[in-house]
Image (spheres, grey):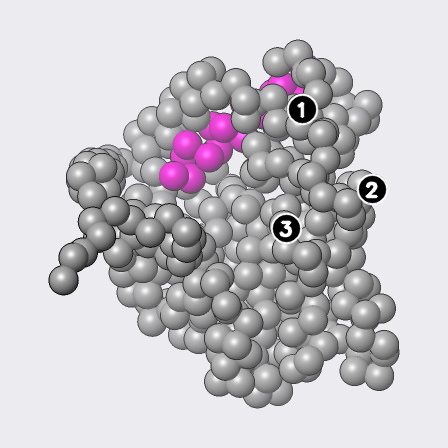
């Protein structure tokens, strides 16, 4: 029997990590372990300085994403702030991302005994109140602050968490991150064909964590105002809340300085089961965008400005990020 040694490129690779690690995967994994071990022995003040330095370096060399960030600020905050302030927000954003990256590499130092040294909690009892219904809770957060710290701490508080995540292409890094995310008894739900898994987690009265602030390519996207501009937004949290009766809680990790975060949670949002489904889904999705916008306006540099948030409109791809922008 003859075997075709060439890959069949007619079929797209299914979502998820590559089935077999390649040389580049092993190099990336060893680099991750090296930096993880390195920062674990640094005091937090050193980690903060090193992370900020990494952010400054990336800000200097990463001109395309620096331009995306400035365009986003033009589209959202417009003339309400000046050019110098916009540039300062972008620089602070990069410094924050560098610090958050190194803080995440230190997450294995976070324990049930010391997590109060890392975070302050605000309105944490909202979860106990919502879980009393037995319908689970949908936690909507954003690429804001350090969302990985939030997931870990909720696990240590014995709140049953199922975290929705995007799989990594590198299978070694993918498995390593999964070990970190699940060491506090959290579960991980990967995005491919995830709705049934989300519904199962809610039926088990778990908290389902969803990061819902990025551009959505899916044909079911809703064009919902964000900073007054239509933004392609996922309807999933609102639609599931309508279907199941689960409460939606919005929460954000706000940096306090020195590697510490305020984990702040808002009062729950409940779907009106008597309302028409499409209108109610739109109402809740708009409210989620409004809450995130309010948080970003309070502390703007902690959001992920480098993402092309307004890449899609109701017709498809926009040309907003092709425009010239002095950086």
Instruction: Residue 308 in the image: state x and y as whole percent.
Output: 62, 36
For label 1, the SS is: helix
Which residues, given as a range, are shown in magenta? 84-101
Residue 311: quadrant of the picture: top right
- Name the one closer to the observer, 11 or 289: 11
Q: Position of residue 262 (x, y in %)?
A: 53, 51
> Which residue is painted at 32% across and 33% down in the image?
47
Q: Is residue 302 above or below residue 279?
A: above
The residue where tag 2 is placed is 228
Residue visible at 63% across and 46% down in the picture: 215
Residue at mark 3: 216
> Where is the C terminus found, in terms of image quarters?
top right
Residue at image mark 1? 322
| Image point (37%, 30%), residue name | 51
Pair 2/1: label in front: 1
Question: Looking at the picture, how far across and down is residue 242, in whole percent?
Answer: 72, 77
Q: Residues within 10 Å of mark 3 (few under 14, many from 20)?
A: many
Magenta span: helix, strand or loop, mainly?
A: helix
- Name the N-terminal-most of marks 1 and 3: 3
Numbered-mark total: 3
């Amino acid at each position: 029997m003859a075997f075709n040694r060439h890959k069949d490129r007619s079929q797209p690779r299914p979502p998820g990590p590559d089935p077999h690690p390649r040389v580049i995967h092993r190099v990336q994994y060893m680099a991750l372990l090296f930096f993880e071990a390195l920062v674990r022995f640094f005091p937090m003040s050193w980690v903060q300085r090193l992370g900020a330095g990494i952010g400054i370096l990336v800000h200097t060399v990463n001109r395309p994403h620096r331009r995306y960030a400035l365009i986003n600020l033009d589209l959202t905050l417009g003339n309400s702030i000046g050019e110098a302030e916009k540039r300062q927000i972008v620089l602070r954003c990069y410094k924050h991302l560098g610090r958050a990256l190194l803080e995440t590499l230190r997450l294995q130092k976070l324990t049930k005994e010391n997590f109060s040294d890392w975070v302050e909690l605000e309105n944490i009892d909202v979860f106990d109140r919502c879980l009393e219904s037995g319908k689970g809770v949908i936690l909507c957060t954003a690429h804001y602050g350090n969302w990985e710290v939030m997931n870990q701490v909720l696990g240590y508080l014995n709140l049953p968490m199922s975290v929705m995540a995007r799989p990594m292409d590198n299978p070694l890094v993918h498995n390593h991150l999964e070990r970190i995310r699940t060491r506090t008894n959290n579960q991980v739900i990967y995005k491919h064909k995830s709705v049934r898994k989300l519904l199962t987690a809610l039926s088990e009265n778990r908290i389902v964590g969803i990061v819902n602030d990025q551009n959505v390519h899916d044909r079911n996207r809703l064009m919902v105002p964000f900073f007054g501009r239509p933004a392609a937004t996922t309807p999933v949290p609102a639609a599931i809340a309508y279907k199941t009766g689960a409460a939606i809680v919005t929460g954000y990790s706000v940096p306090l300085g020195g590697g510490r975060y305020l984990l702040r949670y808002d009062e729950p949002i409940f779907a009106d089961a008597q309302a028409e489904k499409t209108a109610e889904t739109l109402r809740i999705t708009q409210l989620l965008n409004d809450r995130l916008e309010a948080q970003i306006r309070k502390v703007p540099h902690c959001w992920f400005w480098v993402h092309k948030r307004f890449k899609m409109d109701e017709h498809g791809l926009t040309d907003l990020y092709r425009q010239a922008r002095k950086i």
